[in-house]
Amino acid sequence: MKGMLSAEKEIEVRFSEVDMMGVVWHGAYAVYLEDAREAFGAKYGLSYSRYIDEYVFAPIVDLQVQYKRPLRYGMKALVRIAWRPSDAAKIVFDYEIVSPEDGTLFCKATSVQVFMDRDYNLLWDSPAFYVAWKKQMGVL
Amino acid sequence: MKGMLSAEKEIEVRFSEVDMMGVVWHGAYAVYLEDAREAFGAKYGLSYSRYIDEYVFAPIVDLQVQYKRPLRYGMKALVRIAWRPSDAAKIVFDYEIVSPEDGTLFCKATSVQVFMDRDYNLLWDSPAFYVAWKKQMGVL
Amino acid sequence: MKGMLSAEKEIEVRFSEVDMMGVVWHGAYAVYLEDAREAFGAKYGLSYSRYIDEYVFAPIVDLQVQYKRPLRYGMKALVRIAWRPSDAAKIVFDYEIVSPEDGTLFCKATSVQVFMDRDYNLLWDSPAFYVAWKKQMGVL
Amino acid sequence: MKGMLSAEKEIEVRFSEVDMMGVVWHGAYAVYLEDAREAFGAKYGLSYSRYIDEYVFAPIVDLQVQYKRPLRYGMKALVRIAWRPSDAAKIVFDYEIVSPEDGTLFCKATSVQVFMDRDYNLLWDSPAFYVAWKKQMGVL
């Protein structure tokens, strides 16, 4: 995945994430994508804690997931996350979950987050700390 | 939501589904949508058990969720599910999660399932039981 | 289960709660027990919301679960909860998960909660609202 | 924890595991304990896959958890697991979840597993592969 800013996180399938059909339940992938966001945040100094400190929420408002091949118990997978540039006050990430051995694609996804204050009111402009972060990363 | 075939399921937000920000974690909605699929299956004689009996899997291959307003602890919500006609060998559902009191929209979603045999091979044609079900429902 | 105060909640096994072995994953039972606590709270005016209003936490500090027979997909079960009297500043509940049809016992459990203030400091005495509740229920 | 056979696994608290009160929801600890069992299995050649290959289930029949101090978002913790010798056909593990920095105790637990065949019938004697494993480990 090409992207100006990207990160990756290796995940191990947990027994509890596998369903009755012997594959990871589709709903469990949200945890893998969140792990990738946290890895991105840790890498670029934009972790969840930063938002908390700034009294800003960045809830997911849109999530699209394509399940290409099933993940099974015992598998490790690599979750790649790439930041997609956007002028609007939102954060867009694209993801791919692949095999670390041969790059087989398991899943593709895209998430969109917006900014809200503590009372869950939508912020129409990106918070100052986020604009500063974009400048610092050279993507503004 | 207008649809030829539709169902609804009332869900109660569980304490464990609410996150650190005081709203239902976005990943928990997959459970609500699955509850709605099960209600649809129970209503129209197409429950998960039917697939199991026929040795057919119908995994989710595509899931799109739009989070409009947050669900909070103590809330009850109505998940509406409508079957979307499709010629291809797939099952498409559209969902809305609304307030049972005033119809406030919390979430919209669409899921796509395909058919696979027990070895997780894609079935290019709808299984016989599904075609029969569509005829029985008057949607074929 | 005999108890001065008791309640029950019917639960339906969700597909996502069933594991690779075809039975409800042991960790999912915590959700069933919590559903029962919420039913108890709703019945006796001691719901989680009450604690929140009083700025008191009642976290679980001890949980013991015995898994007698497996729950499977498609099953409904009845979770019975009984309040166990205690002089100390704690809340003890005993649970049984049984079949609503023939009373078959699936699971027994006991939970212990203590009281903490908002900074997670242990309260050595029961909060006033809880003592008042016990008097109101005739168990003090 | 002293034990003849032991292992440990570092876990990172996931955002989705933290509840409305800002601490890891008690029910999420089951995942940490399972991670520890998997680490033990990987270390000593007794992973879940081994049971699957032998057509044996080893379901949890008893789980006792004491929550001593809360885990919070951003924390890493060490889950220590020790195998407790037993003559009966069961597997007993003791766990401690501690801070990797100063050994602060967050949680203690004990789990008991028994052996069952594929039809979920209790095996009164330990399976041959488990007895062989005990001999190999020098604990029989």
Image (cartoon, coloured by chain):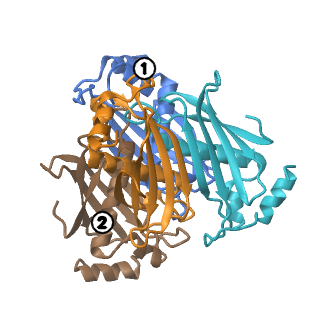
Chain colours: A cyan, B orange, C brown, D blue
The residue indicated by pointer 1 is: D138
Q: Position of residue B65 (x, y in %)?
A: 54, 51
Q: Position of residue A113 (x, y in %)?
A: 65, 56
Indicate the position of residue A35 as horizontal and vertical percent values. Answer: 61, 44
Q: Secondary structure at mark 1?
A: loop
For image coordinates 65% across by 63% down, the residue present is: A57
Which residue corresponds to the image point at 49% horizontal and 65% vertical from the top-left?
B105
Residue at numbered disc 2: C39
Badge 2: how crowded within 10 Å, few (<14), some, or many (20+)? many
In this rendering, is residue C94 above or below D140? below
Q: Provide the chain ID for the residue under circle 1.
A: D
What amino acid is labelled 1 in the image? Gly
Along the line of sight, which residue is nearer the eye, B111 or D13? Answer: B111
Answer few, some or many: residues within 10 Å of disc 1's Cα (few below 14, many 20 plus, some between 14 and 19). Answer: few
Which amino acid type is shown beneath numbered disc 2?
Answer: Ala
**Label total for image:** 2
Decide if residue C23 is on the left or right side of residue B94: left
In the displayed structure, D128 sits above or below A46; it is: above
Residue B43 is situated, as x and y percent measured from the top left of the image, at: 27, 49
Residue B113 visible? yes
User: The disc numbered 2 marks a residue on which chain?
Assistant: C
